[in-house]
Amino acid sequence: MFITLEGIDRSGKTTQAALLARALGPDTLLLREPGGTPLGERIRELLMDPALELGPGAELLLFGAARAALADQVIGPAREAGRDIVCDRFIDSTVAYQGAARGLGVELVERLNEAVVGPCIPDLTLLLRIDPEEAERRGQQRLAAGEADGSDRFEAEGSDLQRRVAAAYDDLAARHPERIVAIDGTGPVEEVHDRVMAVVRARR
C-alpha cells in the first residue's frame, strides 16, 4: 500500500509518517518529498534554502524533477515488489502550495503531477488538519525550549501562506474523497497516531 501524509508545515507529518512506517512493519519503505534519491536530496537543498529566491514556476518544476526521480527509481520498483510505502508529502503538496497558494492553478499542477508520476498515485492520503496559528505556536515552543526550529523557506513566510495552503488542502480533500482522508492533527502524538492507524486499518 502506498500511503502519503499531507498538511501544512508543523502539522506533525514527519512524526506521524515515521510512526506509521514502524507500525506497518520493517519492510515498509519510509520516504520524504522532495528527497529519497540523490537528485531529490540535492533539489531539496535548493528548495528549502531561505536565502534563495525562487518564483512559483521554478518551485513547481524543481518539485516535479525531484518527484519524477522518486517515482521512477524508488516508488515504482517498491510497489512492484509488494512493499508498503509511506511518504512524507507527495503530489498534493505541490497542488496546495504552488497550484493554489502561489496561484499557478490547481488543474495545471494536477496535470503536471499526472505526467510526472504516471501510475505512482497514492492508494491513501492522510491529511493532518491543524490550525495555522497552532502550527506557528509549535514552532515558537521549540525555540523557547532551545530546540532548533529548522524553519525552511516556506515556513519562514508565516501563517498567511499556511492559511492559504490549509484552505487548498480542504478543497483537495473535497475533490478527491476516495483517496484523501482528513484527520485531526491536534493533541498528543500518540492520539494522532491512533487516528492514523484507525484509517489505515479500515483501508487495508
Image (tube, rainbow, N blue to C red):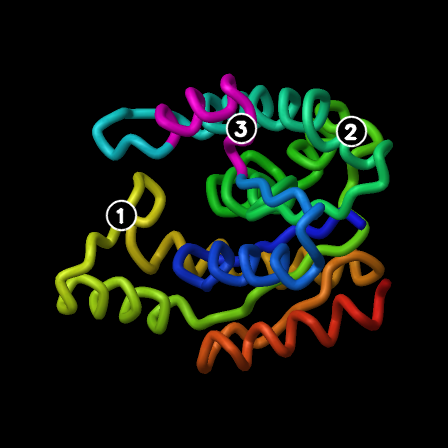
Q: Residues within 10 Å of mark 1 (few under 14, many from 20)?
A: few
Q: Residues within 10 Å of mark 3 (few under 14, many from 20)?
A: many
Q: Which of marks 3 and 1 precedes in the sequence?
A: 3
Relative image position of residue 44 (x, y in whole percent): 42, 29
Q: Is the magenta stretch mostly helix, strand or loop?
A: helix
Q: In this figure, which residue is indicated by the disc labeled 3?
A: 63
Q: Which of marks 2 and 1 precedes in the sequence?
A: 2
The relative height of residue 32 versus residue 72 in the rendered view (above or below) is below
Q: Which residue lies furthest to the front in this view?
A: 26
Report how far apart the C-alphas of labels 1 and 2 lie in the structure: 31 Å
Which three-letter amino acid code belongs to the residue tagged 2? Gly
Q: Which of marks 3 and 2 precedes in the sequence?
A: 3
Q: How crowded is mark 2: few (under 14 residues within 10 Å), some or many (20 or more)?
A: some
Q: In this figure, which residue is indicated by the disc labeled 1?
A: 150
Q: What element carries label 3?
A: helix
Q: Which residue is drawn at 64% across and 77% down?
A: 195
Relative image position of residue 116 (x, y in whole percent): 71, 24
Which one is in front in this view, the residue at disc 1 or the one at disc 3?
1
Range of residues picked out in magenta: 33-47
Q: In this figure, which residue is indicated by the disc labeled 2?
A: 76
Left or right: 34 as drawn, with respect to 134: right
Q: Check if residue 42 falls in the magenta segment.
A: yes
Front-most of residues 145 and 109: 145
Report how far apart the C-alphas of labels 1 and 3 lie in the structure: 20 Å
